[in-house]
Amino acid sequence: MDETNNGFSPRAELWLCLAQALLPPRGEFLSRALRDDLADDLTYLADSLGLDIGDEVGELRAALAQTDAEALLPTYSSLFLVPPIPVKLNAGIYLDGTLLGPNAKMLAEVFYRHGVEQSPDMHDTPDHLATILEFMALLFHEADGVELEMLVPILDDMEAVRGLLRHLSPELSRLARETEQERSLPTVYSALIGVVEAALRDEQRIFFAAVADNESNTPRRYFTKRETAADLVACKACGRPVATARELKVIIDRLRQNGLPSDHLELCPDCRDGIREWKSGKAEFNLPGFR
């Protein structure tokens, strides 16, 4: 939420900005940056990327304008920190029904594959929403300008993490709005999660531009060569594009060399998510978490 030259591409900067906004706003500087700068930063990044998230950012801007900076940390705490925690930011709670379940372990393995591990300052499980969003920023940063052979596995991990987030966000958004209403809290964080949802919808168009509405009018964005490829392979379940034939060959060859199955690559992320059992659920119990 401050304009620093960190060398990230605008899309990586967007996800990093959202990740930081979903951490506890401790300290006057961070609280005031969240209140006064976040909406402007998101608007600037969205305009740079041609993202259609203006309505959601406008809702966030309105919520922030009606909230004192000093109220942000109590609001965050009431939603996400104080037991019994009404809105948990751990993906596994919604996808696995527990902490440290299969999806949390999967994320830890993906982090390790990219040479990163969670900071000791982050006192939570690897599936915390802010950690996942920050990792998305890292993946876009890694993908910027690499050769195809290096790009394909990054895209595959990005696809997996995006699918996880997309299945998590509707339930998280619902719980945040309900809790804000019940406790008469500012609607800042439900609006912020709404921005995350909108950005994820745009990522869907990046991976599958061939099925986007008004494709001919869609502005050129990230991975434009991949969007316009003539050899897109269709999903065997629903017919939507999966990837280019060349990309699939690189991935399949690598998996088979390591004795791993590759049949799942014949499916698009949505159909593949069903196999992985990534689906929204209900967390009807309260855990104190690790804070």
Image: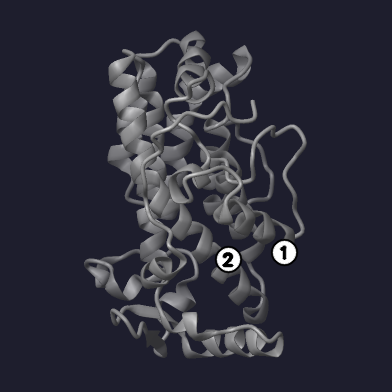
Q: Return the x and y of residue 263 as percentages of the image width and height.
A: 49, 85
Check disc 2 and give the amino acid type: Asp
Q: Return the x and y of residue 114 as percentages of the image width and height.
A: 72, 61
Residue ranking furthest to the front? 285
Q: Which mark is residue 157?
A: 2
Residue 20 visible (yes or no): yes
Q: Is the C-beta separation of discs 2 and 1 under 8 Å? A: yes
Locate residue 232 relative to residue 5 in the image: left or right: left
Q: Return the x and y of residue 236 as percentages of the image width and height.
A: 34, 85
Locate residue 3 relative to residue 245 in the image: left or right: right
Q: Which residue is mark 1?
A: 113
Residue 144 visible (yes or no): no
Of helix, strand and loop, which one carries label 2? helix
Choose between 236 and 105: the one closer to the eye: 105
Measuring 62% from the left and 51% from the top, which residue is drawn there?
A: 135
Choose between 44 and 235: the one closer to the eye: 235
Query: Which callout, 2 or 1, points at the residue further toward the start of the chain?
Result: 1
Measuring 60% from the left and 35% from the top, which residue is drawn there?
A: 3
Of helix, strand and loop, which one carries label 1? helix
Q: How many numbered discs sit on the rendered protein?
A: 2
Marks 2 and 1 sit apart, C-alpha to C-alpha, by: 10 Å
Check disc 1 and give the amino acid type: Arg
Q: Split into 4 quadrants, where in the image is the C terminus?
A: top right
Q: Split into 4 quadrants, where in the image is the N terminus?
A: top right
Q: Which mark is residue 183?
A: none
Q: Return the x and y of residue 91 as percentages of the image width and height.
A: 50, 45
Choose between 36 and 269: the one closer to the eye: 269
